[in-house]
Amino acid sequence: MRIREVAELIETYAPFSGGVAGDELGLLAGDPEAEVTGVATCWSPTLAVLEAAARAGANMVIGHEPLTWGMCGRDPEARLSWYDERHPTAKIPNQLRMASICANRLAVYRYHSNWDWAPQYGMVDMLAGLLELGPAKGGHRMVPLYVIPPTSLRDLAERARRKLELGPIRVVGDLERRITRIAITHGGFGQMFTSPEMALNVGAELAFFGEMLDYTARYCVEANLAAIELGHFQSENPGMIGMAQFLRARLPQAIPVCNIPSGEPWRYLGKSGT
């Protein structure tokens, strides 16, 4: 079976037309005509993930986030340059990742917005299932709304910590507030200053964010929207586990499929120094 045939399975189930216009989707590197030896799904195709995939015998890596770093320091709208930034080809992480891809003959695909809302196996449905929210009862595709029996913000935060095996998490709001209407604003939506409006507009009392800026949290306080920050990786990797499940059910058993967690490359230090 060729690598492009695995891609076709995914793209038939979650077509590019279901993603956001202009989003980067599909093949990013490698030979789609190569015979597939194994598939590794991941949230971010970091150097560590690429090397782990090669060790596992996988020559197809499917990620959700970009493979390479672009010119993030330049604002094309305002024509601002905040610092003297290296060209993408001169960025050290990009060079290391591409060298690993070439050395290990990997093919790397990206399935981003088309997989966010893919039914059953995508980011939102997999996360909602883990958090035991039940089926969506309102909202819209980008911000689904879930209705649950009255549950304290504290209990919802603890449920998220337990189900996603999280360490410390940030919570905004009165911990004893009883919540019945929840919006999922996963991934990087919380990096936009006024993104809590998406949850407010569908009638949510609480938003589960992936990544949440300082500004975002302060907006929630003044808008009386409770918020729980799960982490960008933690809120989206369930969907990449879902992709692995999707592929295992459809590929020949001779083709191994695994999920490689991108993990957290940092640690938290408290007063005890641990």
Image: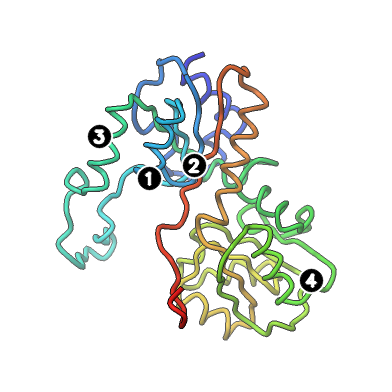
Amino acid type, mark 3? Ala
Q: How many tags in the picture?
A: 4
Residue holding disc 1: 46
| Image colouring | rainbow
Residue for point 46% across, 78% down: 270
Residue for point 71% across, 65% down: 159
Amino acid type, mark 2? Cys
Residue for point 18% across, 58% down: 85
Residue holding disc 3: 99
Front of the two marks 4 and 2: 2
Disc with the residue nearer the chain's start (4 vs 2) = 2
Q: Residues within 10 Å of mark 2 (few under 14, many from 20)?
A: many
Q: Position of residue 271 (x, y in %)?
A: 46, 83
Mark-to-mark CA distance, 4 and 1: 38 Å
Q: Position of residue 96 (x, y in %)?
A: 25, 41
Amino acid type, mark 4? Thr
Q: Position of residue 97 (x, y in %)?
A: 29, 40
Secondary structure beneath disc 3?
helix
Side of 260 relative to 238 (left or right): left
Tell me, yes or no, if residue 116 can be seen here: yes
Asked if the residue under mark 3 is in contact with the one under mark 2, i.e. CB atoms within 8 Å, the reply is no
Side of 45 relative to 204 (left or right): left
Q: Residues within 10 Å of mark 4 (few under 14, many from 20)?
A: some
Secondary structure beneath disc 1?
loop
Residue holding disc 4: 180
Mark-to-mark CA distance, 1 and 2: 9 Å
- Residue 104 tag number: none
- Residue 42 tag number: 2
Residue lying furthest left: 84
Mark-to-mark CA distance, 3 and 4: 50 Å
Asked if the residue under mark 2 is in contact with the one under mark 1, i.e. CB atoms within 8 Å, the reply is yes
Disc with the residue nearer the chain's start (2 vs 3) = 2
